[in-house]
Image (cartoon, rainbow, N blue to C red):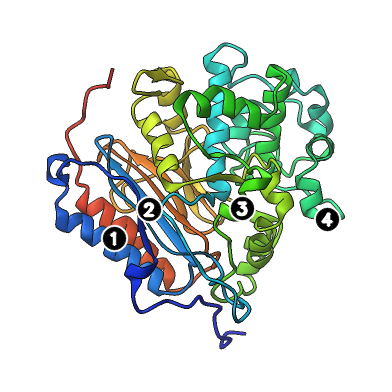
Amino acid sequence: MLLARPALVRVPADLGAVTSDGPTTDADPRSLGVTRDGVASIWRAVEDLYRTGVHPAIALCIRRHGEIIINRAIGHLRGNGPGASPGTPAVPIAADSPFCIFSASKAVTAMLMHLLDDRGLTHIDDRVTEYIPEFGAHGKETTTIRHILTHRSGIPSVSEAGDKLDLLLDPERIVEVLCAAEPTWKPGRRLAYHAVTGGFVLAEIIRRVTGRNVREFLRDEVLDPLGFRWMNYGIADEDADKVAENAFTGRPALFPLSLVVERALGVTFAEAAQVSNDPRWLRGIVPSGNICATAEEVSRFYQLLLDEGALGDVRIFDRRTVHRATSEASYLEIDLTLGLPIRYGLGMMLGSEHFSLYGPRTPRAFGHIGLSQVVTWADPDRDIACALLTSGKPFVGAHLIRTYGVLQAISEHCAPVPRRPART
């Protein structure tokens, strides 16, 4: 197994032929504190990542001081995954093609819960049982919304016989399973990443409080006011062929790392990639994992948070709500699901000075990652809002060095700026 050939995509010699640009700022990037050579260097790092062959497509959008300095994609929407049948048309990716952002969806779902609190409809420290009384079974009666947001509710995963996708797409059934589940630890006691469970609890609270499902609530209260085309849970049937097709690439995870993967996801990497292309997944609502969005839209969402809850004349969140969501709620400690030291906010993964998901020296960065090498974040120190979206689903390998190289290039060429006053 160690010598097995990795599953890779075909990388064309002419990268320009599979590169697509979207709208960017008309301003000289130097006016935004980034040189043209710096922008080019960041994109060369993306090309280096693409040349590893583990991603059929990559999209990157970076806003600096609110202006787009990069909005570009490289690769193929579909038809160039490992094992593609000979003669299958390879469709180039477009800069405005949506990707499934997987667990990066959690940050969006968390902000919807903060929006309820913002409006006085819930409170972050309320017990879950105030809204879902049956959730209190087996010692979970003290579980709070805060515990769910910070991955401390004690139900990082659940076991249920049968088709996992059928379960994920049956919200009534999965809520029943979660209510009946016995916590692994006393609520609040341990940090253990909730790959899928927490999102369903939050979505059910939203449904019971507002009378709308989480997809409708996101559309009505965030997306429509801001003019978003995508960035909701799943997609409409007629848009199925517009979403980047995911592919398992690289080498399979070996024991004992394979156990970490299955504990976190409930399935293998290969199964996760396969499931994410299933029409049922694309049509359904998985609050922790199936938002489909373009890199530009994800960057715009983080610009909303970077600008303390407002874009232009449209205010979505109160400033204090954004500050609370992005402030440290869990110190840098080992996450018992992921096996890595992670800092959490109330629904966000936070950066740090030394060990950061968002590149070096990013202590105030906030955002969320997704399977696999999907990175979405904002960094107030650099005044940037970024989305790095990928359609390859590899595990560990040399590509991780190239992924970090992209983050490092962004941190290097988007240098820290003086603390700016709040935008009005």
Which of the two residues, 351 or 162, is positioned nearer the viewer here? 162
- Above or below: residue 104 compared with residue 215: below
Asked if disc 1 and disc 3 are in contact, CB closer than 8 Å, the reply is no
The disc labelled 2 sits on which kind of residue? Leu
From the image, state whether disc 3 or disc 4 is nearer to you.
4
**How many neighbours does mark 2 have within 10 angstroms: few (below 14), some (14-19), or many (20 or more)?**
many
Quadrant assignment for the N terminus: bottom right
Q: What separation in Å lies between label 3 and label 4 (alpha carbons)? A: 23 Å
Looking at the rendered structure, which numbered label has been put on residue 337?
3
Q: Which secondary structure lies at badge 2?
A: strand
Under mark 1, the amino acid is Trp
14 above or below 38?
below
**Left or right placement of residue 144 versus residue 13 in this view:** right
First in sequence, mark 1 or 3: give its number: 1
Side of 156 relative to 175 (left or right): left
Residue 60, which numbered label? 2
Q: Check disc 4: other Cα within 10 Å, few if <14, some if 14-19, many if 20+.
A: few
Q: Nearer the viewer, residue 247 or 420?
A: 247
